[in-house]
Image (tube, rainbow, N blue to C red):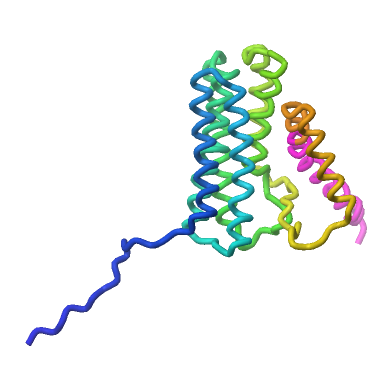
Amino acid sequence: MAEPAIKRPNPFARKGIYLLPNLFTTSALFAGFYAIVQAMNGRFEHAAVAIFIAMVLDGLDGRVARLTRTQSAFGAEYDSLSDMVAFGVAPALVIYTFALKDMGKLGWLAAFVYCVGAALRLARFNTQLEVQDKRWFQGLPSPAAAALIAGLIWVMHDYEVAGHSIRWLAWVLTILAGITMVSNLPFYSGKDINLRKSVPFIAVVLVALGFILVSADPPTVLFALFVGYGLSGYVLWLVRYVRSRRGSPAEGTK
């Protein structure tokens, strides 16, 4: 009599996924795709705003997953793919269409440097999750780099400055953002902030003032904030370098 066949688990069996955090991730992916479409249609202000919206949604999906305890390997991979579109491909294509397309090879090469910088930044981040200090990012985060690009476009559109007029500024900023993403510069992550703990009353007042400041002139204020954040890594690296030099023994001494 033949032995009954052993039922093996199907590795391709359908598995459930958590809806809430992945809904935020899908929304961020849609915002990045929408930015590309709007840039193709010449609506650069809409494209820039869409990238900022994607940044907000990307910041929410991880926190929602942690607060609701719905983290998953699928969500982590899906988030990385969404980030590559929203903060890698979309900003590169939008800035190329806005300011770099008339520069020939220099234009699309700058856009590619940014795009590959975002890809390498995300790949490195995923491989260092277990060993990296949660308080600091290694290299400029891709959402912040995308905000630099989108902020420049939004400000120029708000002041009615044509893209070709600032093509060299856009070229330098695009290259710098791409390189800074793959650098070893430290950038504060804010992940040590515990939203469940009570804070002083002044903190709430400062948050309210921040919202008022941003609402007064969103393009200029947001761009200035992310320029400051982008420079903070260089400043912090310089401070650490100076301190290490002062703390090292003088040459020739034992």
Q: Estimate the x, y position of residue 242 in percent, counting from the top left.
A: 87, 47
| Left or right of 232 on screen, residue 29 | left
Residue that appears at 51% across and 49% down: 23
| Left or right of 95 on screen, residue 176 | right
Residue 133 higher or lower than 178, as above or below: below
| Left or right of 7 on screen, residue 227 | right
Quadrant position of the N terminus in the picture? bottom left
Q: Report the magenta stretch's main SS.
A: helix
Residue that appears at 58% across and 19% down: 98
Quadrant position of the C terminus in the picture? bottom right
Q: Nearer the viewer, residue 62 or 93?
A: 62
Q: Is residue 234 visible?
A: yes
In reply to whether residue 234 is colored magenta, the answer given is yes
Highlighted magenta segment, given as a residue range: 226-254
In reply to whether residue 28 is colored magenta, the answer given is no
Q: Quadrant of residue 218?
A: top right
Q: Is residue 106 visible?
A: no
| Left or right of 243 on screen, residue 223 | left
